[in-house]
Image (cartoon, helix red, strand yellow):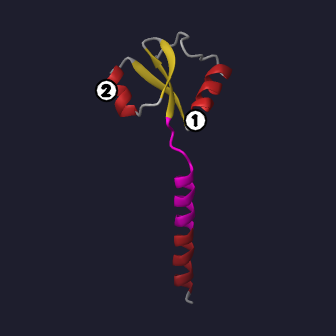
Amino acid sequence: MSSSSRIRLSALATAAAILTFMAATPASAYALICKHGKYDIDSRDEAQLKSAFGTSYCTMRRFSYRSDAENFSKSNNMQVGKSCSCR
């Protein structure tokens, strides 16, 4: 096998490994947002949030699991319903 063939196979194996990892990793399905001056956790994507709230919201951070979003909000003093600002 030539060295260029080995390099191609190595690149293909790396690409396959990355795609496998990405398929196994859940999307950032939950967002900790500030909407209308209060924290909330929402499962909509950015386009849906913008359609629903226009400019009266901002995304603080996205998470793969709702429990991660809830734990982050509690441990960072950003509990759902508490006052916030998008400035």
Mark 1 or mark 2, earlier in chain = 2
* Dominant secondary structure (helix, strand or loop) of the stretch shown in magenta: helix
Residue 16 position (above or below residue 79): below
Measured as percent of width and height from the top left, residue 53 is found at: 35, 20
Residue shown at 53% from the left, 9% from the top: 83
Q: Is residue 54 above or below residue 18?
A: above
Residue at (31, 26) in percent of width and height: 51
Q: Secondary structure at mark 2?
A: helix
Q: Which mark is residue 65?
A: 1
Q: CA distance from mark 1 to mark 2?
A: 23 Å
Name the kind of residue labelled 2 in the image. Answer: Ser
Where is residue 47 drawn, in percent x and y?
35, 33
Q: Are marks 1 and 2 in contact (CB under 8 Å)?
A: no
Residue 18 position (above or below residue 78): below
Q: Residues within 10 Å of mark 1 (few under 14, many from 20)?
A: some
Q: Nearer the viewer, mark 1 or mark 2?
A: 1
* SS at circle 1: loop
Residue 12's spot in the image, x, y percent? 52, 71
The residue under label 2 is 51
Q: Residue at x 35, y 30 (%)?
A: 48
Instruction: Report crowding for label 2: few under 14, some 14 to 19, many 20 or more residues within 10 A (C-alpha).
Output: few
Task: Give percent across and percent down for residue 35.
Answer: 44, 17
Q: Would residue 19 be counted in the magenta stretch?
A: yes
- Quadrant of the rendered structure where residue 14 is? bottom right
- Location of the N terminus by quadrant is bottom right
Q: Amino acid at mark 1?
A: Tyr
Magenta segment includes 15: yes
Q: Nearer the viewer, residue 6 or 78?
A: 78
In the image, farthest residue toward the right: 75
Numbered badge on residue 77: none
Magenta range is: 14-29
- The structure residue drawn at horizontal position 56% and vertical position 49%, both measured from the top left corner, is 25
